[in-house]
Amino acid sequence: MEPHAMPDVAFAAASADYSMFNLFLKADVVVKLVMGGLFFASIVSWAVIFGKGFQLGGLRGRAARFEDLFWSGRPLDELYKRVEAKPDHPLAVVFVAAMREWRRSLEKRTDFSNGQGLVSRINTVMQATIAREISNLQKNMNFLATLASSAPFIGLFGTVWGIMNAFERIGVTQSTSLAVVAPAIAEALMATGLGLAAAIPALIFYNRYSNTINEYAIRLDGFADEFSAILSRQIEERGR
């Protein structure tokens, strides 16, 4: 390269617009698809993150209030009438499901001398309800897990494609100056950056919410065991 051309190349490289929007507009169509897909996935990811955060955050408070009522010594029938119409959290849903089975047996005037069958049915109902409620809590969690694991590789694909374009430009222009190479490299690295920007929050919140849901599942199992013991004692009393 001629010495007098060096300032022009440096000026061209320095004056180039390397904003994210401009890099996206100038990118190859494949890189554009990668960056656009990752950007859209990131938006959906944040929507899931905020939605799940509000869901799980409100769940703790409602569950705590229900447990306070449950252990306050009020009659179970009174509590059942209070929450039957609109159980708004899994603990209440499990309680309502068990009480419905219990009340059906009372209405049919079941013989309580051998209550093992009734206890078994109530436990089955509660476990099925717990499984359904946990499944509802885990809704959209697979999306976060998939995005966390795949987004870096999708971004890397865009980076590799962009670097291939950079080498192609070098071959066509027969120049390795920054003015030729820098835009393509910047486009390529932007794809990796978007992949990481989508994956990191998804991974962090997936782990956090998974732990919260697992802890809540343990809490539901504990409540089911305690409630089963209460109903079992009442069955024994009625069978005497």
Image (tube, rainbow, N blue to C red):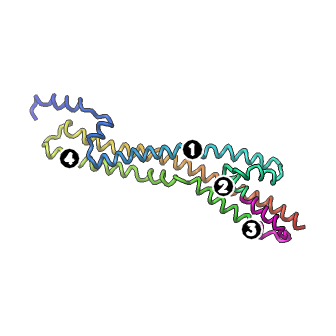
The residues bearing labels 1 and 2 have C-alpha atoms spaced at a distance of 19 Å
Q: Are marks 1 and 4 in contact (CB under 8 Å)?
A: no
Residue 167's label in the rendered image is 4
Question: Disc 3 and disc 2: Cα gap in Å?
Answer: 20 Å
Q: Secondary structure at mark 3?
A: helix
Left or right relative to 3: residue 25 = right
In the rendered structure, which amino acid carries the disc numbered 4? Phe
- Residue 166 vs 104, above or below: the answer is above
Dot 1 or dot 3: first in sequence order is 1
Q: Nearer the viewer, mark 3 or mark 2?
A: 3
Q: Quadrant of residue 146?
A: bottom left
Q: Secondary structure at mark 2?
A: helix
Dot 4 or dot 3: first in sequence order is 3
Q: Residue 218's mark?
A: 2
**Residue 101 on image: x %, y %:** 75, 63
| Badge 4: residue crowd in 10 Å (few <14, some 14–19, many ≥20) | some
Which residue is more in the foreground, 21 or 110? 110
Identify the amino acid type marked 3.
Answer: Ser
Q: Magenta region: which residues?
A: 97-121
User: Residue 21: which quarter of the image?
Assistant: top left
Residue 111 covered by magenta stretch: yes
Rendered image: mark on residue 107: none
Identify which residue is drawn at 20% across, 36% down: 179
Residue at 67% in and 43% down: 61
Side (left or right) of 64 relative to 37 = right
Compare marks 1 and 2 and give the one earlier in the sequence: 1
Residue 98, x across and y down, in percent: 74, 60
For label 3, the residue is 120
Rendered image quadrant of residue 40: top left
Q: Which residue is mark 1?
A: 53
